[in-house]
Amino acid sequence: MSVILKFNCIVGVNFHHPIRNFNRLCSISQSLFDPQRKEPPGPRPLPVIGNLLQLAPSPHVALCELSKKYGPVFTFNLGPQRTVVLAGHKTIKEALVSSDAFSERDTNPIIHDLKLTYGIVFANGDTWREMRHFALTNMRDFGMGRKACEEKILQESQWLINLIKEKNGKAFDTAQPVNHAVCNIICSIVYGNRFEYDDPVFVSMVQRATKNTKLMGSASVQLYNFFPKLFSWVGARKQLMESAFINRKCMKELIKSLQSTLNPHMCRGLVDSFLARKIQLEASGNLNSHYCEDNLLVTVVNLFTAGTDTTSTTIRYGLLLMAKNPKIQDQVQEELNRVIGSRQVQAQDRKNLPYTDAVIHEIQRMANTVPTTVRRTSRDVTFRGYFIRKGTPVLVLLASALQDEDEWETPHTFNPAHFLDKEGNFRKRDAFLPFSAGSRVCTGESLARMELFLFLTSLLQHFHFTPPPGLKEDDLDLSQNGGFTLTPKPHELCAISRV
Ligand code: HEM
């Protein structure tokens, strides 16, 4: 049962909702009398547990299999919660890009307990619109898409390279060094400064973020989400509440120290910018604004949680794939030697590195870091001939696009040729949707793309990655742990210096 309940990706499902149950009854009775209101097909649910038993051993793989039987739009009961699943890149794009009915985020009891309905990720309506716009504008100013961002990532790559050099080619776990480097990029954008890797405040901040993401996706917290009245006592929920409380306290202290040295005309990062805007709005008599403490804290939490684990997991999976496929690693390094030589790589080099670019895209396709995302219908909608009532949770199966058997030549094996044309030029693919699509597409897409390119190329310029002594390439395990994000199983690699 615990394996089954490890359906960790279901960020926002709450079946314990009397209004939804009432709507569901109305919907069934209306569809009985109105043949136009055809509901999506799906497997028959069992009482209470619904179709949960059908999710083992891997929820996104099981749902991809079910879509072969029931089609790209089908119904699935997560416990008693009826959910509509969207599969295949054409269906996903049609729903998320061409329709405005699927842009709300569904929430669940733990999200409400943690007051996460502020900010961006789990917010809806005006709060979401304002905070998303604010974050996008400021991430552009303090990071994304700008030369400043490139410099920050390149500097951080150098710190990471120095740390890995200290391992002297001995086997090490890539998790902490890569997590710290990636988290520092968010720190620079949000707070305006990076931390030393051994700074105790920083180390515990990263540890807490990783722990909280794990707890949020744990089987017992999911059980609480399904049955909040019965399972509010579970240990993981208590630990999560405590850890989130400490996190807020720590962030409040960092924000307080920024506030005491704030110069609204020279913002150091996103927090300064938020505080400056708040002062400006208050001065103009606007008291009913979104620029309140809760929105600041949750936006900052959102950027750390959405922007650290996802990117560092993809980089680590990439290094693992390189160690497992030495010929492909050699080809990347040959291209880097030929085009860049020993100088530092830059973002604009990407266009001259088609093979490397294809490898990085293929790493993202195989890593499948965010296999599902959860939305909710904002109105009654008829989609592809099926009637879906307002407020229905919608599970968008991004994994089904990245591993679509009709789209990719070898969907389940690492094959950079997926992103190359016959002449060896880079080619885009429509089914490549790791950041999702539409109005709620990943806010950090440009930043993440730049980080993946600069961190991976810098590391591969300096090191050749191999399995630890005693292990062969075939012994490296590519299987992943489930959660909000899919992460590689704990492993070690050797980084042999090339320079
Ligand atoms: C490889 C790295 C990353 C991947 C694969 C990824 C993927 C995703 C996906 C699939 C979503 C859900 C979109 C939807 O609901 O349709 C998302 C949302 C989001 N991501 Fe990312 N992400 C990555 C990196 C980042 C970074 C670096 C940041 C910011 C610093 C970030 C910030 C966000 C935010 C704020 C949202 C919520 C957007 C909203 O609800 O409007 N992500 N991401």
Image (cartoon, rainbow, N blue to C red):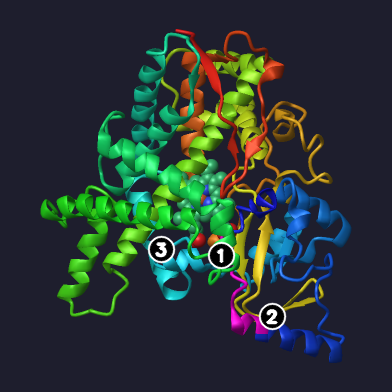
The residue nearer to you, when weighing 358 against 147, is 358
Q: Which residue is mark 1?
A: 225
Kind of residue at badge 1? Asn
Give the numbered dot on residue 363. Answer: none
Q: Mark 2–mark 1 contact, CB under 8 Å?
A: no
- In the rendered image, is residue 146 in sight? no
Q: Magenta segment range?
A: 11-21
Q: Residues within 10 Å of mark 2 (few under 14, many from 20)?
A: many
Q: Which residue is mark 3?
A: 114
Kind of residue at badge 2? Arg
Single out the residue that lies furthest toward the left: 260
Confirm whether the magenta stretch covers residue 392. Answer: no
The residue nearer to you, when weighing 314 against 264, is 314
In three-dimensional space, the C-alpha distance between marks 2 and 1, rounded to whole angstroms, equals 22 Å
Q: Residue at x 30, y 38 (%)?
A: 202
- In the rendered image, is residue 431 in sight? yes
Which mark is first along the chain, 3 or 1? 3
Quadrant housing residue 439: bottom right
Dominant SS in magenta: loop
Number of dots carrying numbers? 3
Confirm whether the magenta stretch covers residue 20. Answer: yes
Label 2's element?
loop
Q: Which residue is mark 2?
A: 389
**Residue 197's x, y, as percent?**
31, 29
Location of the C terminus by quadrant is top left
Q: Residue at x 77, y 50 (%)?
A: 62
Q: Mark 1–mark 3 contact, CB under 8 Å?
A: no
Q: Mark 2–mark 3 contact, CB under 8 Å?
A: no
In three-dimensional space, the C-alpha distance between marks 1 and 3, rounded to whole angstroms, equals 13 Å
Kind of residue at badge 3? Leu
